[in-house]
């Protein structure tokens, strides 16, 4: 496209995936990461079949597959009376339907696979302690200014700098939408995990204004635990110290089995979550957004990282389709992604509402979903899990 490198802001799952996708098109890439060290937080992440399709397209599928835990089913249980609401089999029929498995993985392992591949790719340069602050562009390229005053010249900029994206702030400038929902997360050794909860499944306990999630990691040697509740306070988006007392003051009315989860974390950090309203435009000439910077979402469909991976593959394909034309390539990428990701953002909000239903709403949810056949459940997630790299461009 030109002799200049492409600049990617952010070395999270989205930024590293974008760097790999662009390098696979023969481009030089510079990744600017604000942190002094590259890594991910200690927690799990669920990977839909669409994530595996993307990992394969990025050339890291076998590495990720070797570290993932393949869950047998997905379970939604009522946290009040422990009744089963939904059981989605993740067996051979699921894999045949969607072409790939459903799995769970430690975030550090998923990020590590991308990082290892990026380090092995000679076209990618990874720079740490490089916080992107501003960008200027003209017909010839972009100049990215970092916090230490250094200027990085490139052909284009991909803002994969997360939900607080500096690139989005400069070009879109919208406010985040604080959900009022608070998350506590923990990874627990299997020896400390209650035996009656040790299921090879992502398990969601749906409670009134709350829910709890657990699933195995690292060959079942660990369990990921997530506790979510509607705060009674006005929340400010971000991560702060929390307490077990706070956690125990919520989750009223849930039964003993899921209640055991409240005693497992050892580290009481709390995430006050937010998303943003979907936008139709996130490419501006030679600058675009990707992952949480483009479409931050609540976690209720477990798809934020999966969408970032899909974005990266689509960006690579758009660049291939429009050689030498950055604004056209970035517009094609945006066009191919905006509606799909907006649907996920809006559906995730709705899923949070349904999972947290209380009173008669809870009973309506249970009646609507209980007893659905696997085929009917698969039909419902076809739009989400059926994504393929081969048909990613609109
Ligand atoms: C509780 C919870 C559970 C979740 N569960 C799932 C799940 O099961 N499945 C799933 O697919 N998704 C899940 N997600 C969503 C997923 O974590 C995110 O969507 C995903 O990590 C986004 O990746 P990203 O690379 O776009 O952004 P990030 O992971 O935020 O990475 C952004 C990177 O950019 C860097 N950065 C930020 N600003 C700058 C700057 N100015 N200059 C340079 N670098 C910068 C950051 O340090 C970071 O390294 C969950 C989220 C939450 C909160």
Image (cartoon, helix red, strand yellow):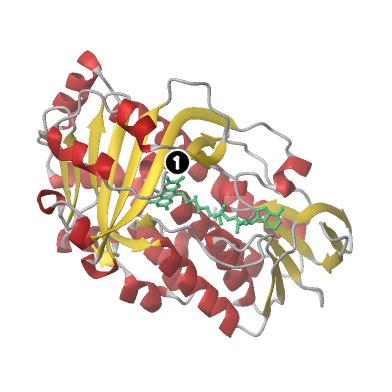
Query: In this rendering, does residue 38 appear at all?
Result: yes
Q: Residue at x 74, y 65 (%)?
A: 7
Provide the residue designation for mark 1: 344
In the rendered structure, the answer to whether residue 213 lies left or right of residue 273 reads left
**In the rendered image, which quarter is residue 354 located in?**
top left
Q: Residue at x 62, y 69 (%)?
A: 19
Of 332 and 259, nearer the camera is: 259
Q: Residue at x 35, y 32 (%)?
A: 245
Of 36 and 49, nearer the camera is: 36
- Report the residue that reaches farthest toward the top: 360
Query: In this rendering, does residue 250 appear at all?
Result: no
Of 221 and 344, nearer the camera is: 221
**Disc 1 packing (10 Å; few <14; some 14–19; many ≥20):** many
Image height of 121 relative to 131, above or below: below
Labels in figure, total: 1
Quadrant the N terminus occupies:
bottom right
| Rendered location of residue 300, percent (x, y) | 38, 39
Image height of 203 relative to 236, above or below: below
| Rendered location of residue 163, percent (x, y) | 60, 45
Q: Residue at x 66, y 61 (%)?
A: 35
| Rendered location of residue 124, percent (x, y) | 66, 77
**In the rendered image, which quarter is residue 155 located in?**
bottom right
Of 217 and 320, nearer the camera is: 217
Could you tell me which secondary element the residue under label 1 belongs to?
helix
**In the rendered image, which quarter is residue 129 located in?**
bottom right
| Rendered location of residue 149, percent (x, y) | 88, 60
Ligand 1 closer than 8 Å to label 1 CB: no
């Amino acid at each position: 496209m030109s002799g200049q490198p492409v600049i990617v802001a952010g070395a999270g799952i989205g930024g590293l995936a974008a760097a790999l996708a662009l390098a696979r098109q023969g481009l030089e890439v510079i990744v600017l990461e604000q942190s002094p060290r590259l890594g991910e937080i200690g927690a799990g992440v669920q990977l839909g079949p669409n994530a595996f399709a993307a990992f394969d397209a990025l050339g890291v599928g076998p590495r990720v597959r070797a570290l993932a835990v393949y869950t047998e089913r997905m379970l939604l249980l009522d946290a009040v009376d422990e009744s089963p609401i939904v059981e989605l089999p993740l067996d051979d029929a699921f894999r045949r339907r969607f072409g790939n498995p459903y799995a769970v993985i430690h975030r550090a392992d998923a990020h590590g696979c991308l990082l290892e591949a990026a380090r092995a790719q000679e076209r990618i340069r990874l720079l740490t302690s490089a916080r992107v602050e501003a960008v200027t562009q003209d017909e010839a390229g972009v100049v990215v200014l970092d916090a230490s005053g250094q200027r990085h010249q490139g052909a284009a900029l991909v803002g994969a700098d997360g939900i607080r994206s500096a690139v989005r702030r400069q070009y879109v400038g919208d406010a985040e939408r604080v959900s009022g929902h608070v998350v506590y997360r923990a990874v627990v050794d299997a020896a400390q995990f209650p035996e009656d909860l040790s299921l090879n499944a992502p398990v969601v306990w749906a409670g009134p204004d709350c829910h709890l999630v657990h699933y195995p990691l690292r060959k079942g040697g660990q369990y990921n635990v997530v506790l979510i509740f509607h705060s009674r306070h006005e929340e400010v988006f971000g991560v702060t110290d929390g307490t077990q007392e706070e956690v125990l003051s919520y989750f009223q009315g849930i039964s003993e089995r899921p209640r055991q989860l409240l005693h497992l974390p050892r580290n009481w950090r709390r995430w006050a979550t937010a998303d943003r309203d979907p936008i139709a435009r996130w490419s501006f000439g030679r600058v675009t957004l990707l992952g949480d910077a483009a479409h931050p979402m609540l976690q209720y469909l477990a798809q934020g990282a999966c969408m970032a991976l899909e974005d990266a593959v689509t960006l690579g394909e758009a660049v291939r389709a429009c050689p030498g034309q950055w604004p056209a390539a970035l517009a094609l990428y945006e066009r191919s992604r905006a509606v799909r990701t907006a649907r996920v953002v809006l559906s995730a909000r709705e899923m949070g509402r349904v999972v947290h239903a209380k009173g008669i709403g809870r009973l309506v949810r249970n009646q609507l979903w209980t007893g659905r056949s696997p085929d009917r459940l698969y039909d419902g997630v076809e739009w989400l899990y059926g994504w393929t790299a081969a048909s990613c461009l609109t």
